[in-house]
Image: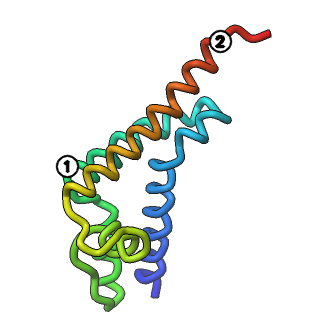
């Protein structure tokens, strides 16, 4: 049971990381030090999405599920949990690249605004 709980906790951690990648720039608008957490997370998230790298959290989760006597799953976290919810059937690498590009563009817009706000004279 402890391994199953650990695997489920990893799912929540994985989801929190994805949300940080997607929306961490908005956190930077309110709290500057979040930049030190968001930029590396964004870089890793984009690399995994655009270069089709394996995420170590997925392998770790599958090991925990196997130790709990539950079958793991093939593919990555996004393919197993997120795609069935929000991605269309038949997701191609081209669509995946476009989604990664959208995340990058969204964060570039946010960080451009953050940079503008930090540079403007206060008063």
Residue 47 location, quadrant: top left
Crowding near pointer 2: few (<14 within 10 Å), some, many (20+)? few
Residue 3: image location, x then y, percent: 41, 81
Is residue 90 visible from the viewing direction of this image? yes
The picture quadrant where one finds residue 93 is bottom left
Q: Is residue 21 left or right of residue 48?
A: right
Query: Which residue has dot 2 on it?
Result: 120
Question: Which residue is label 1 attached to?
Answer: 51
Quadrant hosting residue 53:
bottom left
Front-most of residues 110 and 56: 110
* Figure check: 52 above or below 104: below
Give me the residue at 47% from left, 49% from top: 22
- Image quadrant where one finds the C terminus: top right
Between label 2 and label 1, give the one nearer the viewer: 2
Decide if residue 118 is on the left or right side of residue 107: right
Which structural element holds mark 1?
helix
Residue 15 picture location, percent across and down: 47, 63
- Residue drawn at the location 69% of the way across and 8% of the way down: 121
């Amino acid at each position: 049971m402890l391994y199953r709980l650990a695997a489920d906790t990893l799912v929540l951690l994985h989801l929190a990381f994805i949300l940080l990648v997607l929306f961490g720039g908005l956190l930077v608008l309110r709290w500057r030090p979040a930049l030190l957490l968001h930029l590396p997370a964004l870089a890793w998230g984009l690399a995994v999405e655009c270069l089709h790298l394996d995420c170590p959290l997925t392998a770790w989760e599958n090991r925990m599920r196997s130790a709990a006597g539950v079958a793991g799953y093939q593919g990555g976290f996004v393919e197993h949990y997120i795609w069935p919810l929000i991605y269309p059937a038949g997701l191609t690498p081209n669509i995946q690249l476009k989604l990664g590009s959208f995340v990058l563009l969204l964060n570039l817009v946010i960080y451009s605004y953050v940079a503008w706000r930090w540079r403007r004279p206060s008063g």
